[in-house]
Image: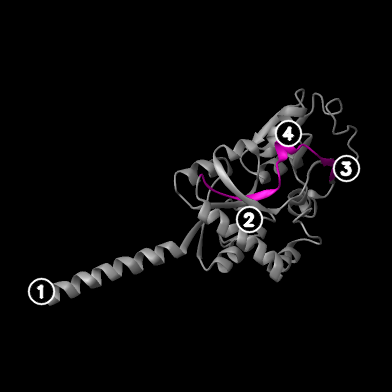
Amino acid sequence: MKKKLFGLAAAIALGAFVGAAQAEEVLRIGVEGAYPPFSEKTASGEVVGFDIDIAKALCAEMGRKCVMVEQDWDGMIPALRARKFDAIIASMSITEERKKKVDFTNKYYNTPARFVARKGADFEPTPEGLKGKVVGVQRGTIHQCYMEKHFPDVKLNLYDTQDAVNLDLVAGRIDAVLADAIALDDGFLKTERGKGFAFLGGDQIDPQCFGEGAGIAVRKGDDKLREAFNKAIAAIRANGTYKKINDKYFAFDIYGD
């Protein structure tokens, strides 16, 4: 009887160990699904895009199983801190303000911000040129920071998703939008809805608001996971996986300098 009990206890312990190991292999990734071409949902409800492919490549490099967890943008950091998922891979820019709440990996890409308005717009993207105009940005983004800092006389409309910003631009409810240049180009200007619109001015620069590029956010103090991601980012850059994903979506390397 004692041998049987010992065998049963050993089996339970082994099962618990295996279960814990399997749980460790599953990595929950917070994604948005509303920011093409970085992340968007297909008609069947699948989340796809550059961020998603990068997340899968990083997990494969780390030997971890990925589970994508959809989350509205303005709830991303609270959901991470509440342990709804383990990391955020959602084009989140590395800024000093966000570093107060989460830790970041090295960047995995860095692209500029630009304005878009109707072709032939009779105003310039300057504080004087946009005075009294209505500009739309996604709520809780680096672009909201930039507009509030540099354009105090603009009427700023905030939206939950970038798609909602673009829709109001098409409808004529706002005069311009500010967002990531690649997201605006591939996700709007090159689409049917984007006909009749164009970039207004050049790249907008402000390291304080725009940060150091897009990184992967993890919970404060989760150094092991952060470093594992850093090693994986370097690895897929070196072995050609990053380039393959990049070239699927873009005509140039968006990793940046």
Residue type at mark 3 is Lys
- Identify residue for label 2: 40
Q: Quadrant of residue 255?
A: bottom right
Q: Which residues are magenta?
A: 198-220
Whether residue 210 is in magenta: the answer is yes
Q: How far apart are labels 2 and 4 at the CA level? A: 25 Å
Q: Earlier in the sequence, mark 1 or mark 3?
A: 1
Residue type at mark 1 is Lys
Question: Judging from the image, what secondary structure is the residue with disc 1 in?
Answer: helix
Q: How far apart are labels 1 and 3 at the CA level? A: 83 Å
Q: Residue 20, position in %: x, y?
A: 36, 63
- Identify residue for label 1: 2
Q: Earlier in the sequence, mark 3 or mark 2?
A: 2
- Identify residue for label 3: 119
- Between residue 90 and residue 234, name the one nearer to us: 234
Q: Residue 150, position in %: x, y?
A: 77, 28
- Identify residue for label 4: 146
Looking at the image, do the residues carrying marks 2 and 4 touch, with CB atoms under 8 Å apart?
Answer: no
Residue type at mark 4 is Tyr
Q: How far apart are labels 2 and 1 at the CA level? A: 58 Å
Q: Residue at x 23, y 71 (%)?
A: 10
Q: Earlier in the sequence, mark 3 or mark 4?
A: 3
User: Which mark is in front, 1 or 3?
Assistant: 1
Q: Residue 120, position in %: x, y?
A: 91, 39
Q: Residue at x 71, y 45 (%)?
A: 212
Specify whether residue 52 is in view: no
Q: Earlier in the sequence, mark 2 or mark 1?
A: 1
Q: Earlier in the sequence, mark 2 or mark 4?
A: 2
Specify whether residue 15 is in view: yes
